[in-house]
Amino acid sequence: MANSLILAAGAIIALSAGSAAAQSATDTKSFAVTGNVPALCSGGTIVGGGSTFDLGVLIDTTTGLLRTDLAAPPKVLSGSFCSSRSTISVAATPMTAQNFTAAPPAGFSRTVDYTATASGWTATAATFATGSGSNPGASQTRPSAFSGDITVSIATFGTNGGSGLRLVSDTSYLGVVTVTLAVAN
Amino acid sequence: MSRVAPLFALVAVAAALPATAQTRSATTNMPVVGSAPQICALQPPRLAPGAQVNFRGLSGETLQIDQMVDSTTLAANAARAAIQFEAVCSFPHRLRIESQNNGLWRTSELAAIPSGGFTYAVPYRAEVSWAGVNTALDADALSRRVAERGVTIDRPGAGTLELRIEIQQGASNVRANAPVIAGYYGDTLRIVLEPQ
């Protein structure tokens, strides 16, 4: 905004000068053309089979314990860009049973923790562990404008309360990973 | 002066446009979904330590009595064993104990009931502790049939299911301490965790 005002003032002066010279054989008029490129970010579009990480059946059906081989293909945010210095942040909520909302009985849990990672934007990937009380690496700053893909992945699954707990039966366990690109101040 | 005014207006518009078009942040949400189906599972049995009296031990899923009768009176000997299973039911469920024969019956003879006051079937008691619930089945051996006992458990359960089998000294389907007729005796006891 400060740059626009200066250009405008210059234009006014030039225009006034043109008027003052109107009595000569040559008449010159100048005017300013101004523009502005705002700092903005776009999150791009998700490629690779929709936006949902579908883990399927979470438990080993012979033991009731959380599967140790849980995995989901990563998601790619394609065409993401920020036209200025930016910050990428990742946040996530644990997977919780949507129908079994009561406190789980002894030996059971209704929550699955995991770690979400957003890489490709900054040298150090942004990570967020749902079971951690503090996630200092969840936001990473890139000092320059950038356009590229962001790969979002989830891993390191664990039963909230301990690996010896079983998950209560529920047809829907749900969590959400949120990736935010923002102009850095 | 009148020519200057439109220029001011042009600049003002140019400055205002970026302010309305800016998107300083972009957020993408990605759900993470899964499910935990209803399961009940019983792991293979193991003999509870120190709980065995007059049993030879557990072989696979067979529990064999060591000395079934007293060698002098031929009355049934007391026997006791406790077996444990690691188990889980991830939803409210039902525990069922089922005796195929309602006691220990001779496996080789299904027809005639012997005379002479001999015991020809041996009763026993099966107790189960599971998910904070205790229940028992008395297989009284008074008739050869399927006998069962069920109890509903209105919550998921996980941990150790313990089965205790006890044969009383002199147990008989005829009269206490009646001599047991010779033969090979057996029963199949099923522990079932199932939907209600």
Image: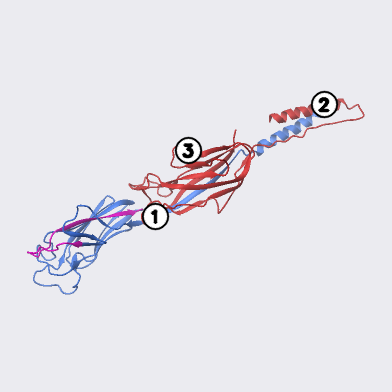
Chain colours: A red, B blue
- Asked if residue A152 lies left or right of residue B54, the reply is right
Q: Quadrant of residue B59?
A: bottom left
**Residue B143 locus on image (x, y percent):** 18, 67
Viewer-side label of 3, 2: 3
Disc 2 is placed on an element classified as helix
Q: Quadrant of residue A30?
A: top right
Could you say which is closer to the camera, residue B108 or residue A136?
A136
**Which residue carries the number 1 mark?**
A60
Chain assignment, label 2: A
Relative height, residue A138 to residue B131 (above, below): above
**Which residue carries the number 3 mark?**
A135
Q: Amino acid at mark 3?
A: Asn
Chain assignment, label 3: A
Callout 2 crowding tier (Cα within 10 Å): few <14, some 14–19, many ≥20: some
- Asked if residue A20 lies left or right of residue B14, the reply is right
**Residue B115 locus on image (x, y percent):** 10, 72
Q: Which residues are magenta?
A: B64-90
